């Protein structure tokens, strides 16, 4: 299918209608585990396709808020701090997508602002992971931006220690890990409405490199590549070349769509595990995780 043929949209909307009937299972063949994540991701899809169908946002909000713990985080059958942080950020993000919010987060439970556990050389050897933690932290701070202005400035100053001509990292990460790390940093900077005019040199360098690279396969790699390359628009640099490449990637993404209308994370398999919890059998079919990533990427390309 060609990205200019909008039939893929109608197919995915039908998939989502069926998922909604199944109480936000991960696939049309079931799997009800990890409900917090499936409902939170579905909120993003309901926002993307709101002009095509009125989804039950009241029910989504009810499901998500059921997981709110007394310590103000959203917890779904895990004691792992990183998973709790990631799922809480995802839950609040989902609520924002359906025009709800939650600013009641006890940020001190997992963060020592004077000694952030993810801001060190060892962590930034893997900029994908470190950038994700930076993005989560900025997300939580931005829930109360005036109160946390100094903390935001402090972590941005620390981030500058890892700023290179072509990204933010330590050591020598591979191209795809570096690009995925840039994407995570960008999501954090976008949350705080960062002015990219001060980063024009690094953005130009990144665009130059990416126009000579292709994304690795898989949902995160494709989505992260699209997110970063779209920044060329922000600096008005090699825009037409970037658009052409983005459309090519969009056509690649459409190959991940299945006859059931959903997208899989890998071209021939759904995501089997999410935040340590089994969510699908990993078969060749559409799933909520792959559909969310691929449709967010296609939305940006569009």
Image (tube, rainbow, N blue to C red):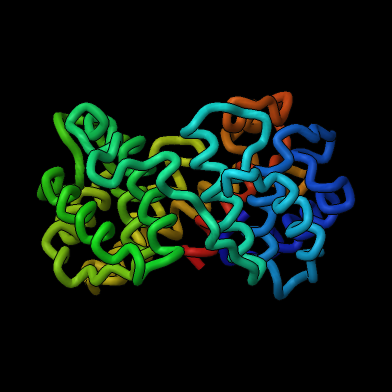
Is 148 rendered above or below residue 251?
Answer: below
Residue at the spot 67% in from the left edge and 36% down from the top edge: 76
Residue at the spot 58% in from the left edge and 44% down from the top edge: 71
Q: Can residue 214 be seen in this view?
A: no
x and y, in percent, of residue 130 in the image = 31, 38
Residue at the spot 28% in from the left edge and 66% down from the top edge: 149
Quadrant where the N terminus sits is bottom right
Is 259 rendered above or below residue 205?
Answer: above
Is 275 rendered above or below residue 153?
Answer: above
Q: Is residue 122 visible?
A: yes
Quarter of the image for residue 248 reads: bottom left
Quarter of the image for residue 99 reads: bottom right
Q: In this view, does 248 lie to the left or right of 73?
A: left
x and y, in percent, of residue 23 in the image = 85, 47
Quarter of the image for residue 177 reads: top left
x and y, in percent, of residue 194 in the image = 28, 68
* Outermost residue to the right: 21
x and y, in percent, of residue 58 in the image = 79, 65
Residue at the spot 87% in from the left edge and 46% down from the top edge: 22
């Amino acid at each position: 299918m060609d990205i200019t043929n909008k039939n893929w949209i109608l197919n995915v909307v039908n998939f989502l209608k069926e998922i909604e009937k199944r109480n936000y299972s991960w696939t049309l063949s079931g799997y009800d585990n990890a409900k917090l994540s499936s409902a939170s991701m579905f909120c993003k899809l309901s926002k993307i396709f709101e002009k095509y169908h009125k989804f039950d946002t009241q029910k989504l909000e009810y499901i998500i808020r059921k997981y709110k713990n007394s310590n103000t985080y959203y917890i779904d059958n895990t004691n792992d701090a990183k998973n709790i942080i990631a799922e809480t950020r995802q839950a609040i993000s989902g609520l924002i997508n359906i025009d709800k919010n939650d600013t009641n987060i006890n940020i001190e439970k997992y963060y020592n602002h004077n000694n952030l556990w993810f801001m060190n050389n060892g962590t930034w050897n893997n900029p994908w992971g470190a950038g994700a933690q930076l993005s989560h932290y900025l997300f939580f701070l931005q829930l109360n931006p005036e109160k946390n202005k100094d903390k935001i400035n402090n972590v941005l100053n620390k981030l500058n220690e890892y700023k290179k001509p072509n990204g933010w990292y330590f050591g020598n990460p591979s191209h795809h890990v570096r690009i995925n790390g840039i994407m995570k940093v960008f999501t954090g900077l976008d949350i705080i409405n960062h002015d990219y005019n001060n980063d024009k040199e690094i953005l130009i360098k990144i665009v130059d490199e990416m126009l000579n690279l292709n994304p690795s396969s898989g949902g995160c790699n494709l989505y992260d590549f699209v997110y970063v390359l779209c920044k060329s628009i922000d600096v008005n640099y090699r825009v037409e070349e970037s658009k052409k490449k983005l459309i090519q990637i969009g056509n690649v993404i459409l190959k991940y769509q299945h006859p059931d209308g959903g997208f899989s994370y890998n071209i021939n398999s759904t995501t089997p595990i999410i935040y340590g919890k089994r969510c699908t059998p990993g078969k060749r079919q559409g799933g909520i995780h792959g559909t969310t990533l691929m449709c967010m990427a296609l939305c940006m390309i569009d």
